[in-house]
Image (spheres, coloured by chain):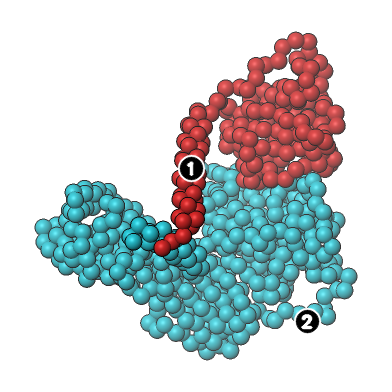
């Protein structure tokens, strides 16, 4: 005869296992519903309006493989993070315009810029930006240097930059430039200096 | 009484099931490898009544359209236009209107039809309508004329070599240990030569044995000295080269302790040629053709991927370095997929004095040289170097090497530009390291494939490296 307390213990374990199974099944349903949501491909924020400000954009030029600083007046919101996003969107707009000094793939967008503590900026590109980017060491690093230098030149106290694609880490921009690392602005400044010298 | 026994039975079954799960995880699962003109793949093997079975649907699905109808114990299977009727628990099967007997009963489990592996020899020719070869002990199934034969010849050169030529490109996983070099063919239909054991008239590489088990073929080459493997001829030729034993520890400069890297050991892909540190200890320069395999790099033209140009130029560089008496080793000598971590791990293990990554571009003109743009952070822990910034202490030497190569290129009137770049694996290397990106002199991209242009660039690169070879050698780890 099996002792009564053992039977009770086994029964309790069985009930717990059933309860956990039900809970996991419900969670699975929740995840499936979340995954089924269609990704929003629209711009994440409307273009900023209001008074314009003088900023410095670091623009890449494929002709000569160079980076040049260019003053520009663009409308900027008051929030530091929103300003960072608008700066980079203004830069991308130059690349998507015609004629373009540094052609990006159609649909390239800045999804967002997140300023984290202390001195870290995270730039989130959309998938079209990376998937449509031309492949090559120089052409990819011109894009990276242009984004980082523009951000650092106009938003004070940014010391490090990380780049994500669609909110996720990606090995490289288009097969060459590493996107897994965090980059010191001071190091990128050295690269910017190299890229501004006429070859 | 029966009521009181049930909980104990439940407990016993639970313990037995847990034990099976725990202990079964230690051995690899059984599988049958299938080689065909359409696809090479593996199918899981299950044991029923002490007999090996597999799912017929899983076996034939990759080869063509299949369909199943279940009606009670009857399992009607269709492959293309051929119908087969099975009944659960019966050995007799009706295929395309005629009966045949399997060596063990057909098993129907949850609408899944399992057939004994030993019955595939009679069943599949009827269903597929063609010859098959079944190796039961090795669990390998060859559909049609797909077997890859090979020859192995020992060559008495200095150093001695074993050259193996395969009927089709192969992509084995290679591992070296003292006294042996092992090649595992997981997805290649390589079959045994005339004899399972091959002997060679070579003291360095005396023999090789061929084994087949659990869906894989293994070629074990016995060596008396360290050896390394190189691919050529688009993966049809593997050359095993015996190399000199590593230099005694006393030759290592005392100021340069053997540093270990804090990176996790990179996963070994099936396409990776893994080489032990001792196997390439004499190598002066590692030449790494960027991209390869699944990763083509830039499309230089519609027909010309970057990976092809990088490999061709890397091979030319190797020849030119050899002619200069500077031993060179290719990190990739075939169309292999290698991650940056794998490239760095192999190169660091080689103990070489210099690493050159080769890239190609259709944009700009001339050549660009890149040294590492180091990422943020990186804390070395005593003798352990941070993986992401392992190159830190070699930055100066790398820039010197790149500058010397730039001088060599300028002397050949090749436009050259020196930059830094966040380009892996440059930052993970513990030696002088730079990348070279070759571009055409004008807009003519076809120049990248031109032997004359590659030779001109290659001679300039080798000349620049040779000029500072003593300096590089002095810093070798």
* Residue B56 as seen in the image, left or right of residue A193: left
User: Which quadrant, please, contains the C terminus of chain A?
Assistant: top right
- Given residues B225 and A160, the one toward you in this image is A160
Q: Is residue B132 left or right of residue B246?
A: left
Visible in this render: residue B31? Answer: yes
Q: Is residue B422 above or below residue A69?
A: below
Which of the two discs, 1 and 2, sits closer to the camera? 1
Q: Helix, strand or loop at disc 1?
A: helix
Residue pointed to by mark 2 = B248
Q: Colour of chain B?
A: cyan
Q: Residue at x 82, y 78 (%)?
A: B251
Vertical arrangement, residue B385 with respect to residue B251, above or below: above
Which element type, helix, strand or loop, lies under badge 2? Answer: loop
**Residue at x 14%, y 60% (from the top left corner):** B94
Per the rendering, the colour in which chain A appears is: red
Q: Quadrant of residue A150?
A: top right
Q: Evaluate if marks 1 and 2 touch, with contact meaning CB atoms under 8 Å apart.
A: no
Residue at 82% across / 65% down in the picture?
Answer: B383
Query: Which of these two is toward me, B378 or B168?
Result: B378
In the image, residue A63 above or below residue B230: above
């Amino acid at each position: 005869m099996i002792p009564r307390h053992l039977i009770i213990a086994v029964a309790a374990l069985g009930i717990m296992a059933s309860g956990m199974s039900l809970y996991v099944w419900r969670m699975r349903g929740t995840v499936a519903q979340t995954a089924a949501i269609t990704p929003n491909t629209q711009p994440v924020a409307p273009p900023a309006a209001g008074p314009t400000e003088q900023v410095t954009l670091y623009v890449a030029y494929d002709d000569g493989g160079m980076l040049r600083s260019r003053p520009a007046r663009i409308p900027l919101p008051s929030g530091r993070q929103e300003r960072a996003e608008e700066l980079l969107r203004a830069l991308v707009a130059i690349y998507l315009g015609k004629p373009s000094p540094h052609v990006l793939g159609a649909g390239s967008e800045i999804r967002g810029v997140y300023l984290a503590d202390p001195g870290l900026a995270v730039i989130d590109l959309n998938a079209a930006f990376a998937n449509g980017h031309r492949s090559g060491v120089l052409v990819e690093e011109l894009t990276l240097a242009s984004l980082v230098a523009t951000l650092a030149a106009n938003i004070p106290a940014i010391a490090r930059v990380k780049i994500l694609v669609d909110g996720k880490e990606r090995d490289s921009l288009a097969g060459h430039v590493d996107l897994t690392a965090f980059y010191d602005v001071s190091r990128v400044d050295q690269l910017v200096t190299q890229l501004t010298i006429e070859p | 009484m029966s009521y009181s026994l049930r909980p104990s039975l439940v407990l016993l079954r639970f313990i037995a099931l847990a034990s099976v799960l725990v202990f079964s995880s230690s051995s690899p699962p059984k599988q049958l490898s299938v080689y065909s003109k359409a696809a090479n793949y593996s199918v899981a093997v299950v044991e029923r009544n002490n007999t090996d079975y597999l799912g017929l649907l899983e076996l034939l699905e990759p080869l063509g359209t299949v369909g199943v109808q279940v009606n009670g114990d009857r399992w009607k299977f269709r492959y293309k236009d051929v119908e087969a009727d099975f009944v659960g628990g019966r050995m007799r099967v009706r295929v395309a209107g005629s009966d045949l007997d399997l060596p063990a009963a057909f098993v129907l489990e949850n609408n899944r039809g399992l057939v004994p592996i030993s019955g595939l020899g009679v069943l599949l020719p009827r269903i597929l309508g063609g010859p098959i070869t079944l190796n039961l002990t090795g669990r390998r199934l060859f559909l049609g004329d797909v077997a890859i034969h090979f020859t192995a010849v020992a060559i008495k050169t200095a150093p001695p070599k074993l050259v193996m030529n395969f009927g089709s490109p192969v992509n084995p996983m290679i591992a070296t240990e003292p006294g042996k070099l092992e090649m595992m063919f997981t997805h290649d239909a390589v079959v045994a030569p005339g004899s399972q054991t091959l002997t060679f008239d070579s003291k360095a590489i005396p023999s090789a044995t061929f084994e087949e088990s659990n869906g894989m073929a293994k070629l074990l080459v016995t060596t008396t000295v360290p050896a390394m493997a190189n691919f050529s001829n688009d993966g049809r030729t593997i050359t095993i080269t015996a190399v000199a034993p590593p230099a005694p520890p006393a030759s290592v400069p005392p100021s340069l302790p053997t540093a270990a890297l804090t990176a996790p050991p990179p996963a070994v892909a099936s396409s990776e040629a893994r080489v032990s540190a001792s196997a390439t200890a004499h190598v002066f320069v590692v030449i790494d053709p960027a991209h390869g395999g699944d990763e083509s790099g830039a499309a230089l033209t519609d027909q010309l991927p970057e990976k092809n140009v990088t490999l061709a130029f890397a091979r030319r560089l190797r020849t030119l370095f050899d002619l200069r008496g500077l031993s060179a080793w290719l990190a990739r000598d075939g169309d292999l997929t290698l991650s940056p971590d794998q490239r760095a791990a192999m190169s660091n293990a080689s103990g070489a004095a210099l690493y050159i990554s080769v890239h190609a571009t259709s944009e700009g003109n001339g050549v660009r040289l890149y040294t590492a743009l180091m990422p943020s952070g990186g804390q070395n822990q005593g003798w352990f170097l941070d993986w992401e910034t392992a190159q830190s202490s070699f930055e100066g030497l790398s820039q010197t090497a790149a500058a010397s190569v730039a001088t060599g290129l300028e002397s050949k009137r090749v436009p050259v530009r020196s930059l830094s770049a966040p380009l892996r694996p440059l930052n993970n290397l513990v030696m002088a390291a730079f990348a070279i990106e070759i571009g055409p002199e004008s807009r003519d991209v076809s120049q990248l494939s031109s032997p004359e242009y590659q030779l001109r660039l290659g001679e300039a690169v080798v000349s620049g490296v040779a000029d500072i070879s003593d300096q590089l050698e002095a810093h070798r780890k």
